[in-house]
Structure formats: structure tokens, C-alpha cells
Image: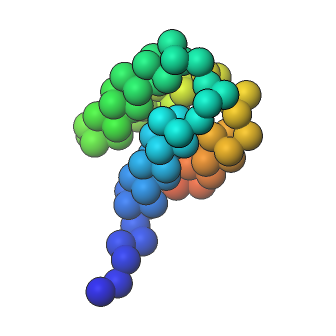
Amino acid sequence: MAKDRSDEAMVGRMIGRVKLLIALSDEIPIETKLNTQQLIKMFEAALEEPGAQSLSASYYRQLYDDLSDYPDLEALLSAMRTFLPHV
């Protein structure tokens, strides 16, 4: 069975990896983990809403600001820009 290679599927897989890295990291403070969990949920919801590109871009920028100090997470978030031109 072929993997879905659509932009939406790629972003979904990247978000899943971001969640996993956040959960497994000992470097990220608990407060940041808790804040970003909620922010990721809001980001995912905004991505699924038609016409909510500015909202999803806002959530993305906040996630990037909160997580850019962690190289693995920063790389994943930067890669998302390839599939989400509006961010």
C-alpha cells in the first residue's frame, strides 16, 4: 500500500514527530511542554479549517518561537514551511 504523500499528510506526520520529540525530551521544561501541547492542538484544528490560514500561521509562529531553541524541533518546524506556504 502506497503512503499518502500529499502536503497535508506530510505536515500531519511532521506534527506527530514534533509531539513525540516534545514528549521524549528531557531538555524541554514541563511548562513549555504543557503550553505547546495545547498550541499544537489549536494549530492542527486551524489547519483543517478552510480560510483559517492566518490563524494557523499565527499558531505556527508561536510554536516556532517556543521551540526554536531545540535543534531537532526547529528543523521539523522549518521543514513544515515547504508544505505550508502560508506560514
- Residue at screen point 43% across, 56% down: 13
User: Residue 47 versus residue 16: which sits nearer the camera?
Assistant: 16
Asked whether the viewer can see residue 62, the reply is yes
Asked whether the viewer can see residue 52, the reply is no
Query: Quick one: which residue is furthest to the front in this view?
Result: 26
- Residue at screen point 35% across, 84% down: 2
User: Residue 68 versus residue 85: which sits nearer the camera?
Assistant: 68
Q: List x then y, in percent, for residue 83.
A: 52, 55
From the viewer's perspective, tell me whether residue 20 is left or right of residue 3: right
Q: Is residue 80 above or below residue 24?
A: below
Q: Choose top left, top right, bottom left or bottom right for residue 77.
A: top right
Q: Choose top left, top right, bottom left or bottom right for residue 71.
A: top right
From the viewer's perspective, tell me whether residue 25 is left or right of residue 8: right
From the viewer's perspective, tell me whether residue 14 is left or right of residue 64: left
User: Residue 64 versus residue 19: which sits nearer the camera?
Assistant: 19
Which quadrant is home to the C terminus? top right
Q: List x then y, in percent, for residue 30.
A: 52, 17
Q: List x then y, in percent, for residue 17.
A: 49, 50
Looking at the picture, the colour scheme in use is rainbow
Q: Is residue 41 above or below residue 12?
A: above
User: Residue 32 versus residue 56: which sits nearer the camera?
Assistant: 32
- Residue at screen point 28% across, 42% down: 48
Q: Is residue 12 above or below residue 23?
A: below
Query: Quick one: which residue is furthest to the bottom in this view?
Result: 1
